[in-house]
Image (cartoon, coloured by chain):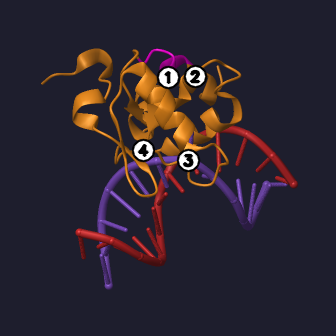
Chain colours: A orange, B purple, C red
Amino acid sequence: MNFYQKVYSLVKKIPKGKVATYGQIASIISTPRAARMVGWALHVGAEENKAPWQRVINSKGMISTTCLDHPKDLQAYLLKKEGVEVKKTENNYFIQLDKYLWRPKKAKK
DNA sequence: AAGGTGACTAACA
DNA sequence: ATGTTAGCCACCT
């Protein structure tokens, strides 16, 4: 299984109304520092693999989409539809990780 | 094969 | 506090 295949698989496991960070996903996959790869993997074939790429954001809880044509508006819109509160800022969107961050395996310790 | 890029993260100034 | 630089790992040229 390719790296991004894992990414899609994991992303698809994110429950509705929750979000995850690139770093966390990368960490779960087995490459804690390949956060960049996660985003890139989604970039190449998220929709193709039917993965909810909109639920994946950066550590700050903001929609990065650094240099893509993907409108952040769309991502924010989708998240709102999912039930996630998306706060709009001047040039970006902000999500409360404390409330909506998905916790795989529920590692409460 | 080597170098460069990238939807990131974290540390340093 | 914010801004910039470096490290990171897989894919592309």
Give the SS element for disc 1. Answer: helix
Mark 1 vs mark 3: in front: 3
Crowding around mark 2 (Cα neighbors within 10 Å: few <14, some 14 to 19, many 20+) is: many
Q: Is residue A63 left or right of residue C9?
A: left
The answer to whether residue A30 of the structure is visible from this angle is no
Measure the C-alpha gap from mark 1 to mark 3.
16 Å
Circles 4 and 2, Cβ within 8 Å, touching? The answer is no
Q: Earlier in the sequence, mark 4 or mark 2?
A: 2
Circles 1 and 2, Cβ within 8 Å, touching? The answer is yes
The answer to whether residue A61 of the structure is visible from this angle is yes
Mark 4 vs mark 2: in front: 4
Q: Are marks 4 and 2 on the same chain?
A: yes
Which part of the image, by quadrant, shows the C terminus of chain A? top left
Return the chain for callout 4: A
Q: Earlier in the sequence, mark 4 or mark 1?
A: 1
Return the chain for callout 3: A
Q: Earlier in the sequence, mark 1 or mark 3?
A: 1
Residue A21's disc is none
* Count of picture labels: 4
Task: Give the percent coordinates (x, y) of residue A47.
Answer: 66, 24
Q: Amino acid at mark 1?
A: Val
**Which residue is nearer to you in this view: A49 or A31?**
A49
In this rendering, is residue A16 above or below A86? above
Crowding around mark 1 (Cα neighbors within 10 Å: few <14, some 14 to 19, many 20+) is: many
> Which residue in the protein does label 3 denote?
A65
Q: Are marks 2 and 3 on the same chain?
A: yes
Measure the C-alpha gap from mark 1 to mark 2.
5 Å
* Magenta extent: A9-14
> Which residue in the protein does label 2 denote?
A8
Crowding around mark 3 (Cα neighbors within 10 Å: few <14, some 14 to 19, many 20+) is: some
